[in-house]
């Protein structure tokens, strides 16, 4: 990328984000916070968990984002009989009796892992290993995944029968936990108009894979003031019951707090949130903007909180 300096590069990132939002808006009605969060996780080189009931256009959203980013997109429908090799690929024998590696659907830029909690832990672990290591090992040989590599996994929050919930240690691999809600009445009218007519929006690629990798490196170079970094780490520490910084609400309602990875993601997310809003350094408001998505799946409520109807969101807001 030919930019004079990092300031010009950050301006280009903010413009690219605005262009992406405008292009995505041709297909996706509403869901502004969801789109913003997915793009932040992409620019931070993190993965996201999308939680919502069926029919909220999760697949359409991911497909649309992959088109405007000019990236390769694959979708895996997770089922109870899915094996690790079904997603990673396997060695197969060719006509010359030589074994060659046939790549699975993991080898893509954006992967939609649909209903990740419907598949057994062995297959979940294969996906989560690829998310962490950015590579797949088959037959003792390691194969690098393409860059950028973003996993967007979906979960249905209602149906829990016959599912395999992700343990907390594996949930921690996801940067964001993004909750999709129902559209408003006006938005739903617009959605139905758009989807029941013969018109189709023409999408154009706005950002290339090379630019995304450049922006991911740029985000890490953004300066953050010590007091903002300490505020982010302090937020994470406040979620841990029984520690010096824990609040009364946390001690009463939380059984397990967030780990150090939450602090890292808070800083990265705040940097990106500042950049897409035209700022060259994040402040505390940027940390607060991304905190619910980062802490939501890393903080575990106890039975008292559930009995009293205290939500994770209420506890996170109390930390501010």
Image (tube, rainbow, N blue to C red):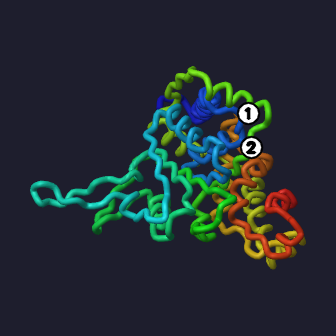
Query: Which of the image's four quarters has the C terminus?
Result: bottom right
Residue 266 position within the rendered picture, expressed as x and y whole percent measured from the top left = 69, 55
**Marks 2,1: beta carbons within 8 A:** yes
Q: Residue furthest left?
A: 96
Q: Is residue 4 shown to the viewer in this render?
A: yes
Q: Is residue 320 visible?
A: no
In the drawing, what numbered circle is on residue 216? none
Q: Residue at x 90, y 72 (%)?
A: 248
Residue at image mark 1:
188
On screen, 217 above or below 314?
above
Residue 269, percent from left and from top = 66, 49
| Residue at the top extreme of this rendering | 199
Of helix, strand and loop, which one carries label 2? loop
Which quarter of the figure has residue 102? bottom left
Q: Residue at x 67, y 36 (%)?
A: 276
Residue 46: horizontal and vertical position, in percent? 57, 52
For residue 232, side relative to residue 198 (left or right): right
Q: Is residue 11 above or below residue 45?
A: above
Residue at the (79%, 37%) spot, across then down: 184
Which comes sooner in the sequence, label 2 or label 1? 2
Q: Residues within 10 Å of mark 2 (few under 14, many from 20)?
A: few
Q: Nearer the viewer, residue 110 or 303?
A: 303
The image shows a total of numbered marks equal to 2
Which residue bears the numbered disc 2? 182
Q: Residues within 10 Å of mark 1 (few under 14, many from 20)?
A: some
Gap between marks 2 and 1 measured at Cα: 9 Å
Q: Nearer the viewer, residue 283 or 223?
A: 283
Asked whether, in this view, residue 78 is left or right of residue 238, the answer is: left
């Amino acid at each position: 990328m030919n930019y004079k300096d990092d300031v010009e590069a950050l301006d280009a990132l903010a413009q690219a984000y605005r262009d992406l939002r405008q292009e995505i808006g041709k297909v996706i009605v509403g869901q502004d916070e969801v789109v913003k969060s997915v793009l932040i996780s992409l620019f931070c080189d993190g993965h996201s968990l999308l939680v919502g009931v069926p029919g909220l256009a999760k697949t359409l959203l991911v497909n649309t984002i992959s088109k405007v980013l000019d990236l390769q997109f694959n979708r895996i429908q997770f089922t109870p009989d899915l094996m690790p090799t079904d997603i990673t690929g396997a060695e197969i024998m060719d006509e010359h009796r030589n074994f060659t590696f046939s790549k699975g659907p993991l080898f893509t830029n954006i992967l939609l892992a649909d209903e990740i909690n419907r598949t057994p832990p062995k297959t979940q672990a294969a996906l989560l290993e690829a998310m962490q290591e950015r590579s797949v090992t088959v037959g003792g040989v390691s194969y690098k995944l393409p860059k950028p590599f973003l996993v967007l996994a979906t979960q249905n929050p209602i149906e829990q029968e016959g599912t395999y919930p992700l343990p907390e240690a594996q949930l921690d691999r996801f940067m964001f936990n993004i909750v999709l809600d129902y559209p408003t009445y006006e938005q739903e009218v617009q959605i139905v108009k758009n989807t029941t007519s013969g018109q189709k929006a023409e999408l154009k690629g706005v950002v290339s894979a090379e630019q995304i990798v450049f922006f991911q490196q740029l985000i890490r170079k953004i300066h953050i003031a010590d007091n903002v970094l300490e505020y982010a780490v302090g937020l994470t520490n406040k979620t841990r019951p029984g520690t010096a910084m824990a609040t009364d609400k946390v001690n009463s309602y939380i059984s397990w707090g967030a780990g150090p990875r939450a602090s890292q993601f808070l800083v990265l997310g705040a940097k990106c949130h500042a950049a897409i809003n035209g700022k060259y350094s994040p402040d505390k408001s940027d940390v607060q903007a991304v905190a619910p998505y980062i802490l939501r799946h890393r903080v575990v409520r106890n039975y008292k909180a559930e009995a009293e109807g205290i939500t994770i969101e209420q506890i996170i807001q109390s930390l501010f």
